[in-house]
Image: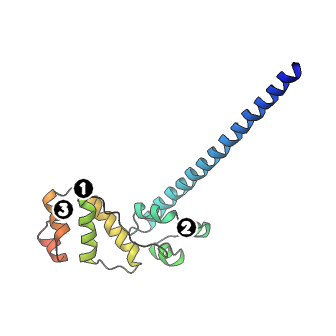
Amino acid sequence: MKKFFLFIFLISGLVFFSACSLGKNKVDKVSHEANAKNICDYLCVSASKSCLELSSNLCSKLCDSWDDSQKDCVRAATNCDDLYNKCQIGKDFVFKPKLDSPCSLACKNYVGKCDIQSKQTKDVNDQNVFDECLLQCENWTSKQVECVKNAELCSGIMIECGS
């Protein structure tokens, strides 16, 4: 009988410690993901100060795909040329805005019609312009949003829509 209780006790202990081990691995994974996000947040604050063209919102989107050498390069960058040319932060980025609101549709039209030129990569620049437009759009009236969304020319957006 004592052997039976000892056996049950040992099995219970193994199950308990196995469960604890599984929980630890899950915590380690969550901790690693949170640490990666903190690193990106830190890098993006620094990068957007070094390069005013790069919004921290876009930087966060880009940072997820950077390897360690790109992150080291961004950490050392002092200006936009360093970020875009040396670090190649926009090399694999494709502008694909999420079109899920009237403002996002209006801003997509604005980016397409106004075609703001930049010496940097076009997709990165378009995303920056789109993100900035979304921030501005929060203060527009619904009439302005519809005007920008339906405008045929950039000049119409600037003159007729009052945005």
Tell me where residue 47 appears, x and y as whole percent.
47, 65
- Disc tally is 3
Quadrant in the picture for residue 123: bottom left
Considering only order in the chain, which callout, 1 or 2, is on the residue closer to the N terminus?
A: 2
Question: Distance of mark 3 from mark 2, alpha carbons?
Answer: 35 Å
- Crowd tier of the residue under label 3, counting other residues whose Cα lies within 10 Å: few below 14, some 14–19, many 20 or above: many
Q: Residue furthest top?
A: 1
Q: Which residue is mark 2?
A: 66
Q: Give amino acid for label 2.
A: Trp
Q: Looking at the image, which residue is at 14% across and 74% down?
A: 156
Q: Are marks 3 and 2 in contact (CB under 8 Å)?
A: no
Q: Looking at the image, which residue is at 55% across and 56% down?
A: 39
Q: Secondary structure at mark 2?
A: loop
Quadrant where the C terminus lies? Answer: bottom left
Quadrant where the N terminus lies? Answer: top right
Q: Give amino acid for label 3.
A: Val
Q: Depth check: 84 or 14 in front?
A: 14
Q: Looking at the image, which residue is at 40% across and 60% down?
A: 57
Disc 3 or disc 1, which is closer to the eye? 3
Q: Which mark is residue 128?
A: none
Question: Taking 24 as reference, is 54 above or below it?
Answer: below
Question: Distance of mark 2 from mark 1, alpha carbons?
Answer: 31 Å
Q: Give amino acid for label 1.
A: Glu
Quadrant in the picture for residue 2: top right
Q: Which mark is residue 145?
A: 3
Q: Which mark is residue 138?
A: 1
- Crowd tier of the residue under label 2, counting other residues whose Cα lies within 10 Å: few below 14, some 14–19, many 20 or above: some
Name the side, left or right, on which 12 lies relative to 6: left
